[in-house]
Amino acid sequence: MITLDVALGDRSYPIYIGSNLLGQTELLKKHLGGSEVLVVSNETVAPLYLDKLMASLEGCRAESVILPDGEKYKTLDVLNNVFTALLEKRMGRQTTIVALGGGVIGDMAGFAAACYQRGVPFVQVPTTLLAQVDSSVGGKTAVNHPAGKNMIGAFYQPKCVIADTAVLNTLDDRQLSAGIAEIIKYGLIRDEGFLLWLEENVEALVGRDTDALVYAIEKSCINKAEVVAADEHEHGQRALLNLGHTFGHAIETAMGYGEWLHGEAVAAGMYMAADLSARLGWLTKTDVARLEKLLRRANLPVKGPSISIEKMKDLMAVDKKVQDGQIRLVLLKAIGEAVVTDDFDAALLDQTLEQCQV
Ligand code: NAD
Ligand code: GLY
């Protein structure tokens, strides 16, 4: 097992990465706030892994609440089911909420933990590659609004993250690739060495080679933990983790939540960011072609769906990076070097939006 640290002073916490961690009783138990636990999962993940997790909580009062599966259920309405379960079961302030699922469950359970009785302990047990390399680390929690993705939420750190790589065996290939998009992101924004490794090993990831997966999860979590430790509340460099997300969130919202997977929308969005960076003279055409090749090898899209430029820009303006009404984008000065900027010619953005869709 690999243990990493998210260094946030007295709110620091470990990320455990390894195979068959789900059944390890002591790993989870030592991070509980008391003896009451509410596991939040969904209709797909619970039949696969809930019993195993519950068994490791023997001796605790462990309850569960099962939410419908899908990005379209990441809403305030559905979140209320968690509060109803907590209240009906008379669960107290020491109750630990455990998220067992992908990023949707992690984001929702985390937000519930931030709100219930003004904050109860929280543990992340991410079960998708995307959640293991990104969403379970760093304390961003949220639900979607019909008008904008992840617009209602809170920063709320977990007590630990338990990333059991064995659960990835049941994940389908499309979801695995969606996770690889966020892995590629770290290479593009701050770790060219990791990008080079990805260029050598992307087929091993797609083919679920265990060593390659563990290495990619570890490198991703190291990158994410460093950024979060330096800028927990996104006053500066944490925004760089949003490479491709302003474009991607607009695609997800325009298409209807769940049509395009988050990782797929981020992949197309990263390609758009690279395309615009090249139009600004920062990246070369060779850099953009290099990214295109890597995304394609990971079975990820490079072009977005057909959406009018006006609609894309409208949706991109509903973004947490907007300042004084101005869209700010994460762009690439070079491979491995990202910046947040509003200093781009609007006509070039139009060209990117026009060229980078099917
Ligand atoms: P997801 O949670 O919808 O999971 C994808 C699918 O895989 C679901 O159908 C799920 O039920 C299923 N699944 C999960 N684990 C499985 C397993 N082990 N075996 C079989 N099926 C399994 O999607 P995701 O890609 O994990 O997460 C995307 C969400 O994460 C988005 O809402 C996005 O906004 C959010 N996100 C948050 C952060 C953050 O920092 N908080 C970062 C990135 C993404
Ligand atoms: N996924 C972006 C962040 O955690 O900041």
Image (tube, rainbow, N blue to C red):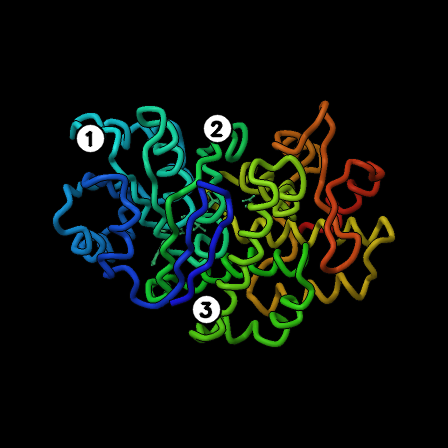
- Residue at position x 52%, y 66% in the image: 216
Residue 49, image x and y in percent? Answer: 24, 56
Q: Mark 2 points at which residue?
A: 152
Horizontal side, residue 127 vs residue 28: left or right:
right
In the foreground, 98 or 268: 98
Q: Name the residue under label 1.
A: 91
Q: Name the residue under label 3.
A: 214
Residue 154, image x and y in percent? Answer: 47, 31
Disc 1 secondary structure class = loop
Horizontal side, residue 169 vs residue 47: left or right:
right
> Is disc 1 in contact with disc 3, using a CB cutoff of under 8 Å?
no
Relative to 219, does residue 310 appear above or below in the rendering? above
Disc 2 secondary structure class = strand
- Determine the image quadrant of residue 287: bottom right
Looking at the rendered image, the disc whose residue lies closer to the viewer, 2 or 1, is 1
Label 2: how many Cα within 10 Å (few below 14, some 14–19, many 20+): some
Q: Work out which residue is located at the far right of the displayed protein and give it.
A: 281
- Determine the image quadrant of residue 228: top right
- Give the residue type at disc 1: Met
> Is disc 2 in contact with disc 3, using a CB cutoff of under 8 Å?
no
- Give the residue type at disc 3: Val
Q: Mark 1 and mark 3: span between their CA atoms?
A: 36 Å
Label 3: how many Cα within 10 Å (few below 14, some 14–19, many 20+): many
- Residue at position x 27%, y 59% in the image: 22
Q: Work out which residue is located at the far left of the displayed protein and give it.
A: 59
Q: Mark 2 and mark 3: span between their CA atoms?
A: 32 Å
- Give the residue type at disc 2: Ile
Label 1: how many Cα within 10 Å (few below 14, some 14–19, many 20+): some
Q: Mark 2 and mark 1: span between their CA atoms?
A: 24 Å
- Residue at position x 56%, y 46% in the image: 229
| Label 2 beta carbon within 8 A of ligand 1 | no
